[in-house]
Amino acid sequence: MKTDEKKTEYLCIGLLAHVDAGKTTLSEAILHRTGAIRSAGRVDHGDAFLDTDAMERDRGITIFSKQASFTTHPAQR
């Protein structure tokens, strides 16, 4: 690798917790804070970014596991 090339670093985050522990809320906050989404949604309002299934939006709960990605900047590390 050349000295002027930047090495890409990856970080994998998994969230596992009891029902109603705030997993989606935390995910929304991370995505919002890193600029991946404009505003953090809420499960109970039916506007959570990760709750894409109609059944999830209708029932106000997260049912299916999801994945999302975001980019960090050197100042955030």
Image: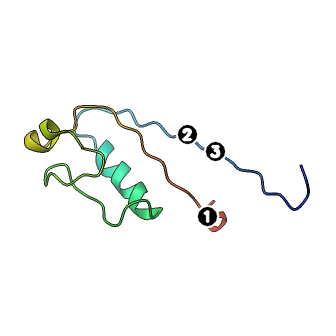
Write the residue at 8% across / 42% down: 58
Instruction: Give, as a three-letter code, the residue at label 2.
Output: Cys
For mark 2, give the secondary structure.
loop
Residue 66 falls in which quadrant of the image? top left
- Indicate the quadrant containing the C terminus: top left, top right, bottom left or bottom right: bottom right
- Residue tagged by mark 1? 73
Q: Is residue 70 above or below residue 10?
A: below
Write the residue at 24% across / 43% down: 52
Instruction: Give, as a three-letter code, the residue at label 1.
Output: His
- Residue tagged by mark 3? 10
Crowd around label 1: few <14 · some 14–19 · many ≥20 (10 Å): few
Left/right of residue 21 with respect to residue 5 in the rendered view? left
Residue sitting farthest toward the right: 2
Instruction: Give, as a three-letter code, the residue at label 3.
Output: Tyr
Residue sitting farthest toward the left: 58
Q: How many marks?
A: 3
Residue 17 falls in which quadrant of the image? top left
Residue 42 falls in which quadrant of the image? bottom left
Q: Position of residue 15 (x, y in %)?
A: 41, 37
Q: Position of residue 7 (x, y in %)?
A: 77, 51
Write the residue at 14% across / 44% down: 57
- Residue tagged by mark 2? 12
Model colouring: rainbow
Q: Is residue 73 above or below residue 28?
A: below
For mark 1, give the secondary structure.
loop
Q: Is residue 65 above or below residue 7?
A: above
Q: Position of residue 63 (x, y in %)?
A: 22, 32
